[in-house]
Image (tube, rainbow, N blue to C red):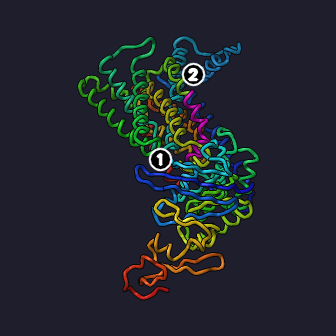
Amino acid sequence: MTGARVEVVGLGAAHGRSRVLDDVRLTVAPGGWTAVIGPNGSGKTTLLRAVLGAHPHEGLVRVDGVPTADTPRRARARQMAYAPQRPVVPDGVTTAEYVGLGRTPHRPLLAAPRAGDRQVVADVIARLELTDLADRLVSTLSGGEQQRAVLARALAQQPRVLLLDEPTAALDLGHAQQVLDLVDRLRRQDGLTVLSTLHDLTLAGQYADRLALLSRGRVVAEGRPAEVLTPAALAGHYGARAEVVAGPHGPVVVPLRGSGRRCGSDRSVSPGGGGEGG
Amino acid sequence: MTAPAGTRPVAAAPARHRRRTAVVLSGAAVALVLAALAGVWVGALPLPPGAVLATLLDRALAPLGVDVPGGLEGTGAAVLLQLRLPRVVLAALVGGGLAVSGAAYQGVFRNPLADPYLLGAAAGAGLGATLVIAYAPGTSLGPVGVVPLAAFAGALAGVGAALALGTAAGGSSSATLLLAGVAVASFLAAAQTLVQQQDSDDLRQVYGWLLGQLGRARWTDVVLVLPYLGAACLVLLLCGRALDVLAVGDDEARSLGVHPGRLRLLVVAAASLATAAAVAVSGLIGFVGLVVPHVVRRLVGGSYARVLPAALLAGGAFLVLADLVARVVLAPAELPIGVVTAFVGAPFFAGLLWSGRRR
């Protein structure tokens, strides 16, 4: 199982009459991790849902050169797994059963899980350290545990591409790091291609190997984290005052309070306020 | 029911689940058989239990050429085979059909309050029956009265209108379908009240029908509903695993290779067909479709692959018992069965909720 090249070509989408995405171009190399960043409402989630095929769109999404629109639904499900920002947690279903749903595209819809399916599920559960939680109801797990269960379900699909919409949205810093470490380990071990959205810029810069900055439905910058995360880009597209510090694994974004003294900022906020932050 | 976190291998969990499901399913099947036996035995005309069993066995084994002696004769046999047996069979079919439909509706709309009457089936059937009772009383087509046919057509028309409105308004998302169903149901209910109020002589008959009745059950009714109920229940049972996938959300279902909209329409259509058939022969029997799935869920967990078959059996057993109570409590008069299902079912369900809270 190796990752696939994901290409997004000229993708556009709308919510009703308002355009959300325009001519988005994006390539994720096999085994790469691209994080889509951008201010609220820039179209990150819509982009991910369009790549999944869950949002109507124009343009093309290709996996290893084959347009997904030409791939049958179930074959596509064996290629691409998806974890939404707010997973729907079904009632009365155990973690093991929930993870087992990931086997759906691998067996006839009417058939019961087979021994092979159960083996994959058991392996994934062991790998994500969910063994002790396997019999617990998913609805009783903590946020971090649920996020791991969602990842386990996606991995049980044995996909080549993981689409993760804000995998850390509901998590505190420690649990967010655990989940991202896990994704990074899985992608390195299995060679999975990861396309995720991440609103936390520092985490995005630390974990992803490429960032795509989405602003008003267009990709305005794409490249290595240090190339994309610049104070100018943060000021211009987020309206944020921040300093970018080089860290050992990528740039660290430090938000600053008050003052308008920002080098390279073309949109500094009015003077006054309480000096320089930090 | 929760297992202690321990070192037990993961593979043990599904095996334990399957065993538990097998126990619940066979328990429900046994309950259904016992309820049916009690149902044909109890009644105004006392029948010796041994003879009842012998007669049933005799009839069941007749095609094999086996002759069981000691059966009932004359009036006793007629009461058993022409009055009580079709009634019990019909109660089991209607109860099972309503419970499966209710569970399916709850799954498709991800809403624990959904029941088979949600999308206008009840209101449509009510309007159909009321129209016939008011304007064409006593007509019949062959052996079948017109009221069941009108109720059947009304129920299907009601759900059909809700589906058409819902899909026209915004695809097959669950919220749109639900709202369309609410709109259609209120409109049809208003139309029914309008017809009903024009002629107060019919009120009693309409209310009697609305509250549900199995008292006039004959074999023709069983034959009338069996094809629809059977086909619809089969489709629903086959959709169990797909409903499990739908339970994690539309986008995720799509990412797992299931088309949520098509699945929703298929399940709603099948559940509505079952409901329409049930309503046609028994009127509106509440509570079965809402509560039996919840009871069953507490026993076998939330997976629809297990809930649906268990609901089929448990719903059948429950309605046979409820009908028995309806016949006995005010004998020789009968309570409307809808009153009994709520009267027996509500406290039972409350008790279940209470015991679940303590667990």
Does residue A137 lie above or below A212 as drawn? Answer: above
User: Disc 1 marks which amino acid?
Assistant: Asn
Q: Nearer the viewer, residue B171 or B240?
A: B171
User: Disc 2 marks which amino acid?
Assistant: Pro
Residue at image x 56%, y 27%? Answer: B230
* The residue stretch that appears in magenta: B231-248
Does residue A94 lie above or below B308 as drawn? Answer: below
- Label 1: state its secondary structure: loop
Residue at image x 62%, y 58%? Answer: A27
Residue at image x 33%, y 26%? Answer: B206
Q: Name the residue at the bottom extreme.
A: A275
Q: Dominant secondary structure of the magenta stretch?
A: helix
Does residue B161 lie above or below A149 as drawn? Answer: above
Q: CA distance from mark 2 to mark 1?
A: 47 Å
Q: Quadrant of residue B4?
A: bottom right
Marker disc for residue B48: 2
Q: Is residue A160 left or right of residue B309?
A: right
Q: Nearer the viewer, residue A171 or B358?
A: A171
**What is the quadrant of the N terminus of chain B in the image?**
bottom right
Marker disc for residue B111: 1
User: Circle 2: is it few (<14), some (14-19), or many (20+) Cα within 10 Å?
Assistant: few
- Residue A219 belongs to the span the image colors magenta: no
**Is tag 2's residue or tag 1's residue first in the polypeptide sequence?**
2
Q: Is residue B46 visible?
A: no
Residue at image x 54%, y 52%? Answer: A50
